[in-house]
C-alpha cells in the first residue's frame, strides 16, 4: 500500500469534482535492457519500472454518468455506462472507456464515476504511458466498486482497452507485467514461454541511469512499426510450423540454419536477432551475478547493434547517441529502450561521468535540432495503491 505524500492528483480531483477521491492508484512506465522484441520466439526479457508514473483518482457518483478529467491537458470528457463507444474525437478518453468495458466483461459491477488522472511518463515513446493509465484505472475502479479483481483480470482489462477497443498498433503483455510487478532496486526477468518471473537486485550505488528522450516524433515510425509486426508474424508462422513449442531457444545451429532457409530476408534477420538475444541473456546474467559491469555493458551494446542492424527498430538519433556516448570513459552502455519502434535511449554510466555525458548530448542538439529530455531514473516499484488522507 503506497503512501499519500500529498500527490497533486488529489488536489486536481478535489477542485474538479468538489470531493476527495475514494481510491488513488498509480502505475509506472517501463523500460527494458534486453529482450523486449523477442515475443515472436518466446524469448526472455529483462526490464524495470520507471520512476515516471501515471496517477488515477476515482470517486463514485449517484447516477450512471461518467466524468473524465485529464489534469495534464486540462481537458474534460463525458460519457455514460450505456454509451461506452469508441469515438475518434474522444482521443485519450477512449482508453478509459475501453478499460471500463473490459472491467464489465470481467464481472466488475459498474456505476457512475468521476475519474481524473495526471502523469509524468513521456507519451508516444514506447514507455507504456497509455497502458500504465489503463492499468492504474482498472485497479482504482475495481477498488472503488469494492470488487475483488485478480491480476489476470487486470491484465485482460488493459489488453481489451488497448488491443480491442482502441486498436493500438502494438501492445505487449511484457509491459503489463513490468508495470504491475516491478520492484524497487531490481531488474525483472520475464520468460515469455510461461511468463515466470525472477527479480535481480542491482546494488550498484555508484551507477547513474539516464533515460534520454530524443524528442523524435513517434508518428514518423508508425508505418515502419506495422511492417515490422508483419515480418515478425511471418517468422512466427514458419517457426511454429517447424519447431515443437514454437520458439528458437532449443535449436541446434543446423536446425536454426534450416529454419532460416524458409523465410524472407527481413524475417531471417529478425529470427537471428531473437536467437542472439537469448544467447546474450545467459551471458548478461552471469556477468551481473559476478558484478562485472563492464562486460555486462558490452552485452547491452551488442543488443543495441542488433536492434539497429537486424531488427531495424532504432533510429538515426538513437544510433548517434549510442555511438557517441559509449566512447566516453565511464559509460557502460547506451541502448534503445521501449516497445514498438521507440525513440528513447537508456544510458548506464559511472556517476562521475555525468558532466561529460551532458556535454556530449549538447552536440546531439546542435546536429539534429532536437532538444533531448534527460531523466535521471532508478529501478522503481510497480502498481501502487495509495492511501488518501482524511
Image: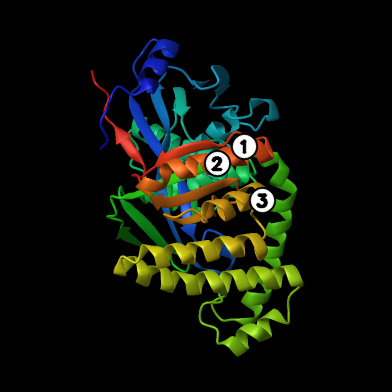
Please say if the residues under marks 1 and 2 sit with CB atoms less than 8 Å apart. Answer: yes
Residue found farthest to the bottom: 254
Q: On screen, 238 above or below 194? A: below
Image side of residue 14 versus residue 356, left or right: left
List x then y, in percent, for residue 325.
Answer: 53, 51
Image side of residue 87 versus residue 46, left or right: right
Disc 3: CA contacts within 10 A as few (<14), some (14-19) or many (>=20): some
Rendered residue at 41%/11% (across/down): 15
Q: On screen, 109 above or below 60? A: below
- Which mark is drawn over residue 194? none
Q: Mark 3 highlights which residue? A: 315
Please say if the residues under marks 3 and 2 sit with CB atoms less than 8 Å apart. Answer: no
List x then y, in percent, for residue 74.
Answer: 54, 17
Marks 3 and 1, the one that precedes in the sequence: 3
Marks 3 and 2, the one that precedes in the sequence: 3
The count of marks equals 3
- Which mark is drawn over residue 365? 1
- Which mark is drawn over residue 361? 2
Disc 2: CA contacts within 10 A as few (<14), some (14-19) or many (>=20): many
Type of colouring: rainbow
- Nearer to us in this view, 359 or 158: 359
In the rendered view of the protein, which quadrant contains the N terminus? top left
Which of the 4 quarters of the picture holds residue 26? top left
List x then y, in percent, for residue 184.
Answer: 30, 47
Q: On screen, 211 above or below 314? A: above
Mark 1 secondary-structure assignment: helix
Res. 385 visible in picture: yes
Image side of residue 179 versus residue 219, left or right: left
Res. 150 visible in picture: no
Q: Marks 1/2: CA distance? A: 7 Å
Amino acid at each position: 500500500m503506497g503512501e499519500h505524500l500529498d500527490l497533486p492528483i488529489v488536489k486536481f480531483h478535489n477542485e474538479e469534482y468538489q470531493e476527495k477521491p475514494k481510491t488513488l492508484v498509480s502505475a509506472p512506465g517501463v523500460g527494458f535492457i534486453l529482450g523486449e522484441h523477442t515475443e515472436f520466439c518466446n524469448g526472455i526479457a529483462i526490464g524495470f519500472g520507471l520512476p515516471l508514473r501515471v496517477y488515477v483518482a476515482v470517486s463514485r457518483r449517484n447516477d450512471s454518468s461518467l466524468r473524465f478529467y485529464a489534469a495534464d491537458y486540462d481537458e474534460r470528457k463525458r460519457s455514460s455506462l450505456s454509451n461506452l463507444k469508441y469515438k475518434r474525437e474522444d482521443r485519450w478518453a477512449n482508453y478509459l472507456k475501453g478499460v471500463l468495458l473490459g472491467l464489465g466483461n470481467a464481472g466488475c459491477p459498474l456505476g457512475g464515476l468521476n475519474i481524473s488522472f495526471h502523469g509524468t511518463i513521456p507519451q508516444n515513446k514506447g514507455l507504456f504511458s497509455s497502458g500504465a493509465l489503463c492499468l492504474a484505472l482498472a485497479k482504482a475502479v475495481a477498488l472503488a466498486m469494492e470488487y475483488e479483481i485478480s491480476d489476470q483480470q487486470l491484465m485482460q482489462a488493459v489488453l481489451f482497452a488497448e488491443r480491442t477497443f482502441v486498436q493500438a498498433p502494438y501492445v505487449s503483455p511484457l509491459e503489463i507485467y513490468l508495470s504491475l510487478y516491478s520492484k524497487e532496486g531490481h531488474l525483472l526477468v520475464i520468460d515469455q514461454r510461461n511468463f515466470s518471473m525472477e527479480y535481480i537486485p542491482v546494488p550498484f550505488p555508484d551507477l547513474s541511469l539516464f533515460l534520454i528522450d530524443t524528442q523524435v516524433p513517434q508518428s514518423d515510425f508508425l508505418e515502419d512499426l506495422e511492417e515490422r509486426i508483419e515480418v515478425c508474424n511471418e517468422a512466427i508462422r514458419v517457426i511454429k510450423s517447424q519447431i515443437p513449442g514454437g520458439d528458437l531457444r532449443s535449436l541446434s545451429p543446423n536446425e536454426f540454419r534450416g529454419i532460416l532457409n524458409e523465410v524472407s530476408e527481413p524475417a531471417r534477420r529478425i529470427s537471428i536477432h531473437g536467437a542472439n538475444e537469448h544467447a546474450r541473456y545467459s551471458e548478461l546474467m552471469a556477468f551481473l551475478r559476478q558484478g562485472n559491469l563492464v562486460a555486462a555493458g558490452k552485452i547491452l551494446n551488442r543488443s543495441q547493434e542488433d536492434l539497429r542492424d537486424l531488427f531495424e527498430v532504432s533510429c538515426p538519433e538513437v544510433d548517434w547517441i549510442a555511438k557517441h556516448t559509449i566512447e566516453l570513459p565511464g559509460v557502460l552502455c547506451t541502448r534503445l529502450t521501449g516497445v514498438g519502434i521507440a525513440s528513447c535511449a537508456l544510458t548506464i554510466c559511472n556517476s562521475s561521468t555525468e558532466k561529460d555525458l551532458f556535454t556530449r548530448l549538447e552536440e546531439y542538439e546542435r546536429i539534429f535540432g532536437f532538444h533531448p529530455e534527460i531523466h535521471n531514473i532508478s529501478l522503481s516499484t510497480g502498481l501502487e495503491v495509495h492511501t488518501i488522507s482524511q
